Amino acid sequence: MRALNLYFLTRIDSAEIFSEYESALAGLRSPRTVKTHEQKSIHALVDALREKQLPLSAYDHFFLSFVISHISKEFDLLKIAADHSMILNIELKSQEIDTARILRQLLQNRYYLRHLSGTVFSYTFVSGTGKLYTLSEDETLISCSFDKLCEDMLRFHDCVSSDIESLFRAEDFLISPSQTPDKFLSRSYFLTTQQNDFKSRITEQLDKMPDGGFLCLTGSPGTGKTLLLYDLAMDRSVSSEICILHCGLIQKVHRYLDRKMDHVRIFSISELKNAKDLAGYQLLLIDEAHAITAAQFGLIRESMQNYGQICIFSFDSRQILYASEESRETVLLIQSLSADIYKLSDKIRANKELSSFITSLFQPQKRVSIYDYHNVRILYAQDAAETARFLAYHMTQGFVFIDYDNSFPQLLSAKESRSQSLEIVGQEYDKVITVIDSRFFYNEEGKLSADDDNEKSSPLRELLFQAVSRAREELTLIITGDPALFARINALKLVR
């Protein structure tokens, strides 16, 4: 994506031509459609600036509608100094909205931009009223004149003109209690619109359940279930005692959070011996509940009945497909008892390029042509021994090998193997490598399948999906012993 000159862009009035012109100026591989109200807002902004007799150079080096792909965060207009000493952000609104919403958006934008620069000039222009707002030094919203905006625009000389995507990496923004605990504890994060909506609804519902009860929070990997669960714990701990039960291996980070969070107890559900262990807590939060056993659920239910507690179960519905039969039946029982089920669908940890490739891998007919998948590597190994050599090498290069069906136990310690079997959900890594062998094939419908497919589910196929979806930045696949399958998958990177 290239920066463009706003003045040059607004010399076109036709909506259809405007979109094509903008796409060409921005160097986009595939044209995008600029909505009519967005076009009018840009025209109105430039018209207002023209009255100030700004030089043409002041309109240069603006990125329009840039999106941080990992979190789907969009900025209307950005201008970035080449040395990253300062950033100008202008948001466009077609009509007046609540100033609290304007303030919240500008604060969120500044949060995301400050990883790159300590100086961010933040504005919102309302084209319907001609009003201009800015953030003051103490981060309050104030009305201002265009003279102020012009002054800030003229501060910029040498600017970033292309490849803005390289300045924003997933790890700069993806906050997880288990991976970035200090950022979580300092509340250096924002919830998505959907997370905030669910938080408000759950909080309201909790206040209406004095005698206790069940709630469920579900969603696929990357939708932010754990962050929302821990955020609720942080808020409710101000007035209540909270217990978070983790249905998997307790790691050092869980112990760390347990020590740091007041009035919040975190421990493994495997440590739960009897219902009395949960006495004294008003709210029970069960993370990764798809791994819960019937006996563990029985103790929780007994505690809830004895002490009038509320329990929120958080789980990934996809994981239920290959959980044990006991766990599946238990989760189905939990859902039937729940007063409400909140399903997160907005994926906030998605690298769009990798997400597109994963979709293409399982359903090639859905390949998106705008990506060249430069962060995906497809390798071929002739046999298991060669595969092991490739894996060992990549593990020395910072890749995390996810052995989703324990095919290469010699490469992982017993602890690592056990950890992966329990923790593959909820963990993400910058660089992931995994294996696809001759058990996989493309069926008559063109979908990736596995030899253990049946009418109800495909554990191998699902395990592979969970493995590849752990990657945040880079993904490497080793295709073993099947040249035809390798050719089919490798072609995904070659199609144009």
Image (spheres, rainbow, N blue to C red):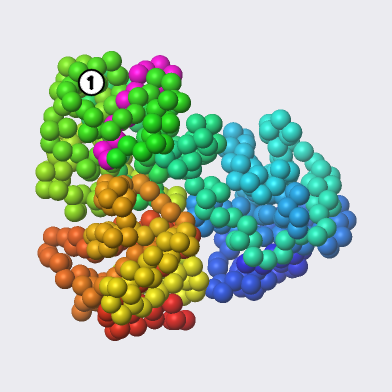
Question: Within the magenta stretch, is there residue 245?
Answer: yes
Pick the front one: 200 or 483: 483
Whole-percent x, y for residue 449 in the image: 22, 70
Label 1 residue SS: helix
- Residue 287, quarter of picture: top left
Residue 38 in sight in this render: no
Give the residue at x 56% y 74%: 29
- Residue 244, quarter of picture: top left
Whole-percent x, y for residue 322 in the image: 19, 54
Is 28 above or below relative to 195? below
Give the residue at x 24% y 63%: 407
Whole-percent x, y for residue 40 in the image: 65, 58
**Residue 373 relative to residue 406: left or right:** right
Residue 342 in sight in this render: yes
Is 219 above or below relative to 189? below
Pick the front one: 133 or 187: 187
**Residue 305 relative to residue 23: left or right:** left
Residue segment shown in magenta? 235-248
Circle 1 crowding by C-alpha within 10 Å: few under 14, some 14–19, many from 20: few
Q: Which residue is mark 1?
A: 277
Pick the front one: 472 or 432: 432
